[in-house]
């Protein structure tokens, strides 16, 4: 029989060696050592506590390397184990939620973060200003920050080293220790866990495209971090920038991203800086500045590849592929997309891989492989539907319609319209849930109008004069946009300081109801009396995407 004491010594030596490998930037070697330690400790019930500590480290390195399914399995086992130290639970819940988020398990991720929020709040020595309750809300419907670097002391477990890092694709977090009781002193570990939890909750809201809740949570997270750990403000600023970018507010997105980059560089967070560079590159590409995007991508990859940051590296390759495709270099684009897909599949990053499938479909279409393009687009749309991401499904259908238009086959126009009209109506309706008039205006100009332009082109090419007329009437009957100068600015900066160039939603803005359905006026024969304009298309949009497109009220057309 193997001596448990001797096994315990071996496990400790392997764990210490793994921590040392992780410290010197070799996560794969660290993972292999932790795996050996876990296999050695598992058969010995008397070593259960040591085994769970090793399992935490194994899950941490799995997530760091992008193997989120393995990390989820290990962390779920730890959370379910009766011997798990209760002090470890909040930090483990955050790690668990991050890997769940990468795989698209949004409901479970939010439930884990809500529990973590409650535990961290209960452990606070004093109430934390600005950190309100984080109740779970179901959403009606961009890769975000990568793992932070950390300094791990030899002999500790990864899970028990240092303060919590900011939540991201594969972050590691510290275990809360007893923090100071002085409210004017340094923040307690529970306060730092709560900060990480708030940033993670705002990440979930952004990923789920729940824009009103994302606005509230990103503002709350930024305020709390600025109050108690201003040196870590780069991470919440990244989420504010990501939210602005996702909702078509390119100018504030650029301002926030540049502020986040400066904060990460000042705080010596190279991984965070790499993530911001990826975001800025995406923004530059979206606004036609490819020559500025490419150097940022290479700078980001210079960190993410050696550091083993799988998802971030895949995102960098995908964006380089998009630039190559824009130059007509289809073979180069396809090779880069293929490399990105391999990493994302290994990571279990389902939402990101589905978005990549849309890029790959465009290359397949341009290369004369329409069946492959069709298969990829159907897979992406079905994946987004299964994840509850109605807006992304609508955007995928719109991309599909655009490819059909580009193909020039008149026989495909009806199919393109079937995809594009409900998708464009759903995308346009997203703005009604936004809090500020300027936000709605930017969504309309930068996101909805290109979608509606495609619909009008397709309808005109198909000779659908009645559809064009109904589209015009429906658009004229929508809720008006609040003009930028219609609401006076407040005295002094808003809750996010001078960064915002628009009135803060809590004080000066309000969401509006979707417009009513438009009753068609009867013609000379009485036909059309009581019918709703685009009724079938509106119903299809609401059924396909789970988004409210029109209010239940009706008004007569004029």
Image (cartoon, helix red, strand yellow):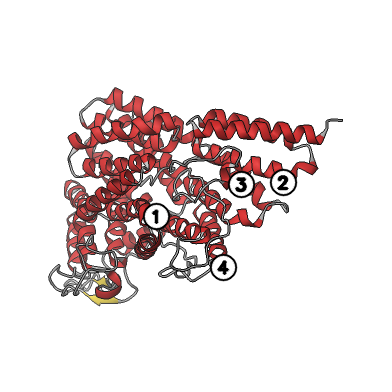
> From mark 3 to mark 4, how far is it between C-alphas?
22 Å
Residue 368 image point, x, y percent: 29, 27
- What's the residue at 33%, 27% (across, down)? 334
The crowding category of the residue bearing disc 1, from other C-alpha atoms within 10 Å (few below 14, some 14 to 19, many at least 20), is many
The quarter of the picture where the C terminus appears is bottom left
Mark nearer the viewer, 3 or 2: 2
Mark nearer the viewer, 1 or 3: 3
Q: Relative to 406, say whether 166 is above or below.
A: below
Residue 75, disc: 3
Q: Is residue 117 left or right of residue 306?
A: right
Q: Secondary structure at mark 1?
A: helix
- Furthest residue in direction left, as rendered: 485
Q: Quadrant of residue 314?
A: top left
Residue 192 image point, x, y percent: 47, 57
Whether label 1 touches label 3, CB < 8 Å: no
Residue 122, disc: 4
């Amino acid at each position: 029989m193997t001596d448990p004491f001797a096994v315990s010594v071996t496990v400790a030596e392997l764990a210490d060696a793994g921590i040392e490998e992780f410290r010197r930037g070799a996560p794969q070697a660290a993972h292999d050592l932790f795996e050996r330690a876990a296999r050695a400790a598992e058969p010995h019930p008397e070593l259960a506590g040591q085994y769970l500590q090793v399992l935490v480290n194994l899950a941490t390195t799995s997530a760091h390397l992008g193997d989120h399914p393995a990390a989820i399995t290990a962390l779920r086992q730890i959370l379910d184990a009766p011997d798990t130290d209760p002090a470890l639970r909040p930090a483990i819940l955050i790690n668990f939620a991050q890997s769940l988020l990468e795989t698209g398990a949004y409901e479970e991720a939010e439930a884990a973060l809500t529990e973590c929020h409650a535990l961290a709040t209960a452990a606070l020595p004093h109430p934390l200003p600005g950190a309100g309750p984080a109740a779970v809300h179901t959403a009606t419907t961009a890769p975000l920050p990568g793992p932070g670097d950390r300094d791990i002391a030899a002999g500790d477990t990864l899970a028990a080293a240092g303060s919590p890092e900011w939540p991201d694709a594969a972050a590691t977090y510290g275990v809360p220790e007893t923090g100071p009781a002085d409210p004017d002193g340094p923040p307690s570990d529970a306060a730092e866990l709560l900060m990480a939890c708030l940033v993670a909750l705002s990440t979930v809201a952004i990923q789920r495209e729940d824009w009103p809740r994302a606005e509230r949570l990103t503002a709350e997270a930024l305020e709390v971090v600025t109050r108690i750990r201003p040196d870590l403000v780069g991470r919440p600023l990244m989420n504010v920038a990501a939210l602005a970018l996702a909702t078509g507010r390119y100018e504030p997105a650029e301002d926030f991203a540049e502020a986040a980059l400066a904060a990460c560089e000042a705080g010596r967070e190279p991984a965070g800086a790499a993530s911001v560079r990826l975001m800025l590159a995406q923004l530059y590409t979206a606004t036609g500045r490819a020559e500025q995007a490419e150097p940022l991508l290479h700078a980001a990859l210079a960190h993410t590849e050696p550091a083993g940051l799988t998802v971030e590296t895949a995102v960098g390759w995908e964006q380089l592929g998009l630039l190559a495709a824009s130059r007509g270099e289809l073979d180069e684009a396809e090779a880069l997309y293929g490399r990105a897909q391999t990493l994302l599949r290994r990571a279990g990053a389902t939402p990101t891989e589905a978005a990549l499938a849309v890029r790959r479909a465009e290359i397949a279409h341009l290369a004369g492989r329409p069946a492959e393009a069709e298969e990829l687009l159907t897979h992406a749309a079905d994946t987004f539907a299964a994840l509850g991401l109605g807006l992304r499904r609508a955007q995928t259908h719109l991309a599909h319609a655009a490819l059909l238009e580009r193909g020039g086959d008149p026989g495909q126009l009806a199919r393109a319209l079937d995809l594009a009209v409900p998708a464009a109506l759903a995308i346009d309706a997203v703005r009604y849930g936004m809090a500020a008039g300027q936000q709605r205006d930017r969504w309309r100009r930068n996101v909805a109008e290109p979608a509606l332009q495609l619909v009008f082109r397709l309808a005109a090419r198909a000779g659908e004069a009645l559809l064009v007329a109904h589209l015009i009437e429906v658009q004229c009957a929508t809720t008006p946009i609040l003009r930028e100068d219609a609401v006076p600015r407040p005295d002094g900066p808003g809750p996010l300081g001078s960064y915002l160039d628009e009135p803060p939603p809590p004080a000066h803005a309000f969401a509006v109801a979707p417009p009513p359905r438009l009753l068609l006026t009867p013609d000379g024969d009485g036909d059309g009396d009581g019918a709703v304009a685009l009724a079938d298309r509106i119903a299809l949009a609401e059924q396909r995407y789970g988004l409210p497109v029109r209010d239940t009220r009706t008004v007569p057309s004029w």
